[in-house]
Each structure stands twice: as structure tokens, then as C-alpha cells.
Amino acid sequence: MAKSAAQKKAPPKKRGSMAGVMALDLPLAEPTAAMAAYFQKCRDKIGYVPNVLTAYAHDMAKLEAFAAFYNDLMLAPSGLSKLEREMIAVAVSSENKCFYCLTAHGAAVRLLSGDPALGEMMVMNYRAADLPTRQRAMLDFAVKMTRASHEIGEADREALRAAGFSERDIWDIAAVASFFNMSNRMASAVDMRPNAEYAGAGR
């Protein structure tokens, strides 16, 4: 007996410009001059545009806001090193089981530290790593923020001061941890996929 039209398997949906980037099929917006230059800078420096940027490129205002906030948090002068900020990103992403951020920022930890084993330990369980007291305190705080931010109290901030962090450093730890909690949830919600290049970086 012939199958009805309803019973026939529908052909797979054609993917648009976001194929391989995320599950939402949003069209790319016309890039602003600033964002076109930023994407070219990515290609020149690392050879590709990170998929997180492509995912936001359906809306130039959102992309510009995301990129500006990310670059300020992760690259601007801070009492936290770039490696320490990437370590926070990975510890938070490990708690949230965010595939995109663990892949991308695990690679960054490997590259910045020159230690592939550290990158793997950070992804799996930062407590397995032989970290200085300063970095252990920093990650403990970031993870507590991720699990139960409402439980953060003065004793937690005092533990960071005792480990050598300034008041501004504590703000930066909290800001980086907060940003990646947001980014993890967004990446998981839209099934954001990491660039293939991350997998082999720094190994």
C-alpha cells in the first residue's frame, strides 16, 4: 500500500548560513565596517572566525556588544593574567557542562600555559591540578558563584584577599565567572558547535 504524503519522510531541512555553527537557522546580517574588520583580524591572526562570533552575527548590535564585553573582560589590563581568566572560563564551563566553551577555552588554557595536561585537568576537574593557592582560591570562588551565587558572603571575598587578590581583582573574577555562566547557557540553548581547529590546538 502506498504511503500517504503525511507518512512519507520529509526531506531534511535545508540549513542556511548557520550550518555547523548552531541549531538556529538565522540569516547573517550585513556586517558593519567594524565587525567586517574584526572578522578579518580573526582570520589573519588565528586562521578562522570563532563560531560564537558567527552565531551572534545575525544581529550586528548584539555581536558588537558581545565582542566588546568579551574583549574587555578577557584581554584588557587586569590583575588577573590572561591564563587565569581562561582558567575561570573553563572551571565555570566544566560546572555547566558547556561543550562549546570547554572546547574553545580548554584550547586557550593549553596554548597560554604551554601545558596540555593542565588544559585537560581544567576541563575535567580543576581540583586535580597542582595549582598555587591563589589560583585555587580564584577557581573555588568562581565555581561557588556558578553553583550557588546566593551563598557568596564576606568570608568568600576575604579568602580571595588572603590569597593576594585586590578589590578590583575580586570584581574581575566575579565578572569573568558571570559572563561565562551567561555564555554557557546561551551556547547550550542554541547547540553552538566549536570550530574544529580548537580540538587540536596546544596539544
Image: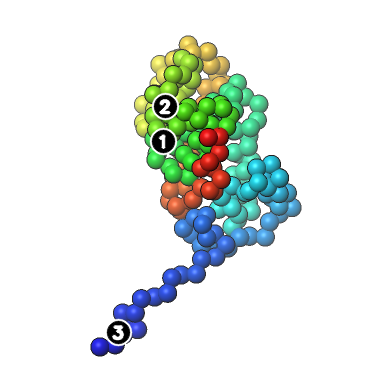
Depicted 181 relative to depicted 38: above or below: above
Q: Can you give x and y, in whole percent of width and height, for residue 41 in the image?
A: 71, 45
Q: Mark number for residue 155?
A: none
Q: Mark number for residue 3?
A: 3
Q: Closer to the N terminus: mark 2 or mark 3?
A: 3
Badge 3: residue crowd in 10 Å (few <14, some 14–19, many ≥20):
few
Inspect the image, locate mark 2, and give the three-letter code of the amino acid beneath it: Tyr
Spatial distance from mark 2 to mark 3, Cα to Cα? 55 Å
Q: Can you give x and y, in whole percent of width and height, for residue 66 in the image?
A: 59, 44
Label 3: which secondary element: loop
Residue occupied by mark 1: 94
Q: Mark number for residue 126?
A: 2
Q: Can you give x and y, in whole percent of width and height, for residue 16 in the image?
A: 55, 65
Badge 1: residue crowd in 10 Å (few <14, some 14–19, many ≥20):
many
Residue 9 sits in quarter: bottom left
Q: Residue at x 56, y 45 (%)?
A: 197
Label 2: which secondary element: helix
Q: Quadrant of the N terminus?
A: bottom left
Depicted 54 relative to depicted 74: above or below: below
Badge 2: residue crowd in 10 Å (few <14, some 14–19, many ≥20):
many
Spatial distance from mark 3 to mark 1, Cα to Cα? 47 Å
Q: Is residue 54 visible?
A: yes
